[in-house]
Image (cartoon, rainbow, N blue to C red):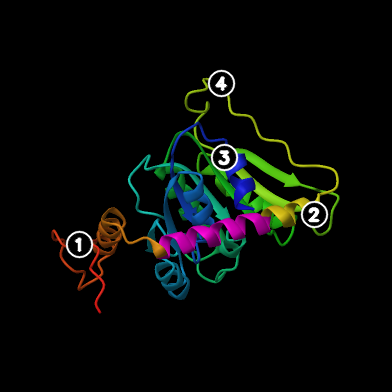
Amino acid sequence: MTDRALELLNLPPGPAMLLDIGCGSGLSGEILDEDGHVWVGVDIAPSMLEVALEREVEGDLFLQDIGQGFGFRPGSFDGAISISVLQWLCNADTTSPTSSPYARLTRFFTTLHASLSNGSRAVFQFYPQNDDQIQLIMGVALKAGFTGGLVVDYPNSKKAKKYFLCLFVGGSAPGKGRQQQLPQGLTGEPEGVQYENRRTENSNERGRKDKKRKNVKDREWILKKKDLYRRRGKEDVPRDSKYTGRRRKPIF
């Protein structure tokens, strides 16, 4: 689903700065890494972010309740993706005006719109409970300044049917100079075998990359990891020296 979300983002060639909303343990982030993008992840679950840190994901991570909105600088991101998260903003306390689904969605979409650059997109794969929930989400998003709409893949399939909310910031895409158009949903019967094979191939490829990472001992890789730990506030990171990454002689 992350691959499909990236396809709907329709990014220009080259690396982009992306926001992964509800990043969890960083599985989507791995795909963003493979495509050469830089990313920032936010999630409300500390336990999931701990797993992401243990897996040494490349993106910067934030503990964040997205229903409270974002504090990023305007235009910080070239796009945003979210997988299986958006519907949870509708499960809120309806007795308080400030914590109702409408209030949380309003804070979320308003601050997200501000943090995205002009001409960018935000793509949300989500599981709506009913049509009323879809209308609520889309209505708040449009009121916050977004344009766009709903893309439904395989609408006639019970198992493969997927909802994507594809939102645009501004009129035209960067570098293309034409009005952004809502993408078409995938139709027909999903080729399940091909999708399963692709998922397996991607998993195997990531597994091979993880093994390569664990076996890397060169100086550049070590310095990069140490810098990443320092930026995340980890204590007791060894200082850099001329001996960092130097291969030691075998001891007999």
Q: Gap between marks 4 and 1, in whole Å?
A: 51 Å
Instruction: Tell me if 38 is positioned left or right of 148 in this view.
Output: left
Residue 201 sits inside the magenta stretch? yes
Asked if residue 130 is positioned above or below residue 152 in the image, the reply reads: below
Of badges 4 and 1, the one in the foreground is 1
Q: Residues within 10 Å of mark 3 (few under 14, many from 20)?
A: many
Q: Gap between marks 3 and 2, in whole Å?
A: 23 Å
Task: Read off the magenta span.
Answer: 199-214
Of badges 3 and 4, the one in the foreground is 3
Mark toward the start of the polypeptide (3 vs 4): 3
Mark toward the start of the polypeptide (3 vs 2): 3
Give me the disc on residue 9: 3
**Predominant secondary structure in magenta?**
helix
Q: Is residue 243 visible?
A: yes
Q: Amino acid at mark 3?
A: Leu
* Residue 245 image offset from top left, x and y in percent: 24, 61
Q: Gap between marks 2 and 4, in whole Å?
A: 35 Å
On the image, numbered disc 1 is attached to which residue? Answer: 244
